[in-house]
Amino acid sequence: MNTQELFFRYFESIHRQGPGNTASTNRAFQIAKPFLPDKPLIADIGCGKGAQTIDLARQTNGQITAVDIHQPFLDSLEQRAAELNLTNHIRTLQADMNALPFSPESLDLIWAEGSIFITGFENGLKNWRRFLKPGGIIAFSESVWFSDDAPDKIRNYWNEVYPDIQTIEASLELIGECGYEVIGHFSQPKECWLDEYYYPQEAILDRWEPLYAEDPELSGLLKMFRREIEQYKQYGDYYGYEFFIIRKP
Ligand SMILES: C[S@@+](CC[C@H](N)C(=O)[O-])C[C@H]1O[C@@H](n2cnc3c(N)ncnc32)[C@H](O)[C@@H]1O
């Protein structure tokens, strides 16, 4: 086993691959809904195993193309969609979010929960804009500072892992500069991070850390996951995910 294999096995073992929950997905979708046609064409980018894809499919008559680079996540989503009789609404597509194969102005809604950071916040907003029909919507969650006075320790941590993190105000400004209007935004509650994302990881780490203790690379990866969780438990009042629902005029 190498670190990449362990990385994927780890995320394949949990229900969500990023912070989120059904209530937040539903809340964001309800904000977008008045602006969507009856049967919207939706792309869920960086869908992972598709926890939010399933939540979306339950609320729409539309068609969702669930996109991820990692085929085993898509296989898992397909199986779950079949079990829930949702295959009429969901198709999967293995593709790179930096080179999406959609036609110009073909989508009513782009969904990106905890994934736009991979291509870059600004980059994603600029590059994905062309796939939206006029009036089309992007709904995405992104890391933000909730406070201007975060302690140095957590600022230094974020500088190391994701220096592009901004305040909500700065994010809203950037959204405007990229040519979108904001329909709504809200901060995701701590349950999204703890109950849905970090507690399931802790259960895995408790089992796996002893198994890989002798391997410096594998145990280093697990330490990195553990450190992320501990940072959140200590400093989670200072940062989190903001869900933004924005519209191409
Ligand atoms: C942080 S996870 C979020 C997954 C899911 N949206 C959720 O909230 O549970 C990011 C996802 O993006 C996928 N990903 C990473 N790089 C990608 C790329 N270049 N193109 C498409 N998907 C990518 C990963 O495989 C992973 O499933």
Image (tube, rainbow, N blue to C red):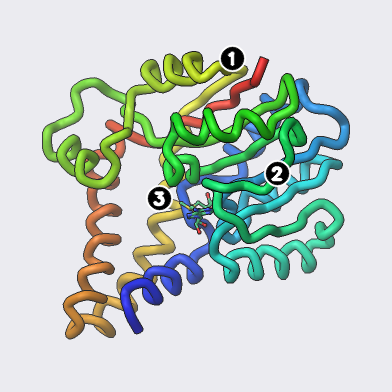
> On the image, numbered disc 2 is attached to which residue?
102
CB under 8 Å between callouts 3 and 2? no
Q: In this view, does 88 lie above or below 61?
A: below
Residue count near mark 2 (Cα–Cα under 10 Å), binned few <14, some 14–19, many ≥20: few
Secondary structure of the residue carrying tag 2 is loop
Question: Which residue occupies the foreground of this view, 249 or 210?
Answer: 249
Residue at screen point 68% across, 58% down:
93
Q: Earlier in the sequence, mark 1 or mark 3?
A: 1
Q: Is residue 65 above or below residue 242?
A: below
- The kind of residue tagged 1 is Glu
Left or right: 59 as drawn, with respect to 145: right
Query: Disc 3 versus disc 2: distance between alpha carbons?
Result: 35 Å
Residue 96, given in percent of the width and then of the height, sits at 55, 53
> On the image, numbered disc 1 is attached to which residue?
181
Classify the position of the C terminus by image quarter: top right
- The kind of residue tagged 2 is Phe
Query: Disc 1 versus disc 3: distance between alpha carbons?
Result: 31 Å
> Mark 2 near ligand 1 (CB under 8 Å)?
no
Residue 176, given in percent of the width and then of the height, sits at 50, 14
Q: Is residue 28 above or below residue 208?
A: above
**1 or 3: mark nearer the eye:** 1
Secondary structure of the residue carrying tag 3 is helix
> On the image, numbered disc 3 is attached to which residue?
194
